[in-house]
């Protein structure tokens, strides 16, 4: 465990030194994400001009939800997004050989090697927005509940990353440039909608097979609701299912992987 922690520190040092070489991109990302955050709050603000409730949530509650998925998105962009960009390229070009020979987990190396230092300011901004809206909420939250709320949000960010990997890892079989990434991005908008607007089979689908509702909606429900047992059960089961599926897909993909030397 200590070896992986030390290795990750090397990843961070390299990422920060590389980010300083492209300062225009650094500031452009800040401006771009600020615009994205503003649009999200304006979109739901306009909806609440016409209805007092949306998906069973008041405007104060939906503000916490928006802040939550903004934070999850920023966390993903900072820690995981660059890695998902390079993974299909490594597989298709046969560059995966280099990582399979390392004396550490190839999945760890490929999943955490790239840290987007130029997105770190955006993560701090997203966290600040979330804290500000939590402090401005009409009711108070216990320290213990807030602690687990943030744990669930971190899990939501990792769940987003792992769900995306399921679509990317199809390159082992298809040989396409990005696997089924376009399908993921078409469905990913569900992540930015409160789970209460979905009913029946669609609601179940977005809790299990494509667990977008578990990434931000359910952590927010955990924070705002009194009865949290069902919420926690859904998050744990859905997360374990996706993590296990990614592990199986990765191991099976490696078995059919054609290296650069084959």
Image (cartoon, rainbow, N blue to C red):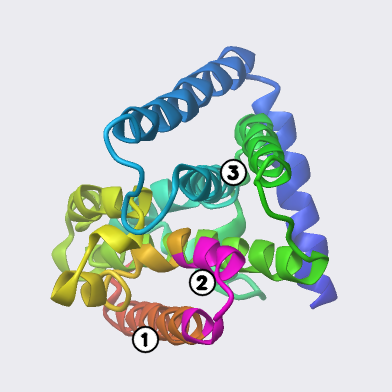
Q: Secondary structure at mark 1?
A: helix
Looking at the image, is mark 3 or mark 2 earlier in the sequence?
A: 3
Which residue is denoted by mark 2 in the rendering?
Answer: 100
- Residue 23 at x, y percent in the picture: 64, 15
Q: Is residue 222 magenta?
A: yes
The span from disc 1 to disc 3 (Cα, nearest Å) is 26 Å
**In the image, which disc is placed on residue 78?**
3
- Residue 54 at x, y percent in the picture: 32, 50
Q: Which residues are magenta?
A: 218-232
Q: Is residue 224 magenta?
A: yes
Name the side, left or right, on which 203 lies relative to 232: left
Image quarter where the C terminus lies is bottom left
Looking at the image, is mark 1 or mark 3 earlier in the sequence?
A: 3
Image quarter where the N terminus lies is bottom right
- Residue 112 at x, y percent in the picture: 60, 58
The span from disc 3 to disc 2 (Cα, nearest Å) is 25 Å
The residue at 67%/61% (across/down) is 150
Q: Residues within 10 Å of mark 2 (few under 14, many from 20)?
A: some
Where 24 falls versus 152 (above or below)?
Answer: above
Please tell me which residue lies in front, 122 or 86.
Answer: 122
The span from disc 1 to disc 2 (Cα, nearest Å) is 17 Å
Which residue is denoted by mark 1 in the rendering?
Answer: 248
Please tell me which residue lies in front, 58 or 84.
Answer: 58
Q: Are marks 1 and 2 in contact (CB under 8 Å)?
A: no
In this rendering, the label closer to the viewer, 1 or 3 = 3
Looking at the image, is mark 1 or mark 2 earlier in the sequence?
A: 2
**In the image, which disc is placed on residue 260?**
none
């Amino acid at each position: 465990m200590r070896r992986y922690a030390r290795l990750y520190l090397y990843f961070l040092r390299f990422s920060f030194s590389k980010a300083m070489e492209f300062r225009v991109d650094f500031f452009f990302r800040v401006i771009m994400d600020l615009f994205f955050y503003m649009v999200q709050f304006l979109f739901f603000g306009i909806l609440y001009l016409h209805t007092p409730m949306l998906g069973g949530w008041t405007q104060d509650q939906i503000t916490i939800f928006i802040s939550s998925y903004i934070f999850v998105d920023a966390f993903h962009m900072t820690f995981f997004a660059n890695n998902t960009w390079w993974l299909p390229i490594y597989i298709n070009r046969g560059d995966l050989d280099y990582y399979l020979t390392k004396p550490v987990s190839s999945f760890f190396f490929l999943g955490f090697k790239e840290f987007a230092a130029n997105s770190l300011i955006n993560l701090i901004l997203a966290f600040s927005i979330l804290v500000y809206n939590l402090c401005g909420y009409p009711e108070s939250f216990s320290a213990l509940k807030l602690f687990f709320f943030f744990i669930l949000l971190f899990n939501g960010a990792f769940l987003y990353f792992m769900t995306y990997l399921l679509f990317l890892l199809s390159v082992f079989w298809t040989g396409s440039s990005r696997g089924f990434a376009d399908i993921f991005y078409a469905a990913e908008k569900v992540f930015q909608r409160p789970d209460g607007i979905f009913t029946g089979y669609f609601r179940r689908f977005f809790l299990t097979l494509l667990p977008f509702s578990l990434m931000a909606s359910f952590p927010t429900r955990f924070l705002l609701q009194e009865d949290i047992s069902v919420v926690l059960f859904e998050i744990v089961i859905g997360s374990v299912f996706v993590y296990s599926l990614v592990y199986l897909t990765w191991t099976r993909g490696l078995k059919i992987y054609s290296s650069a030397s084959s």
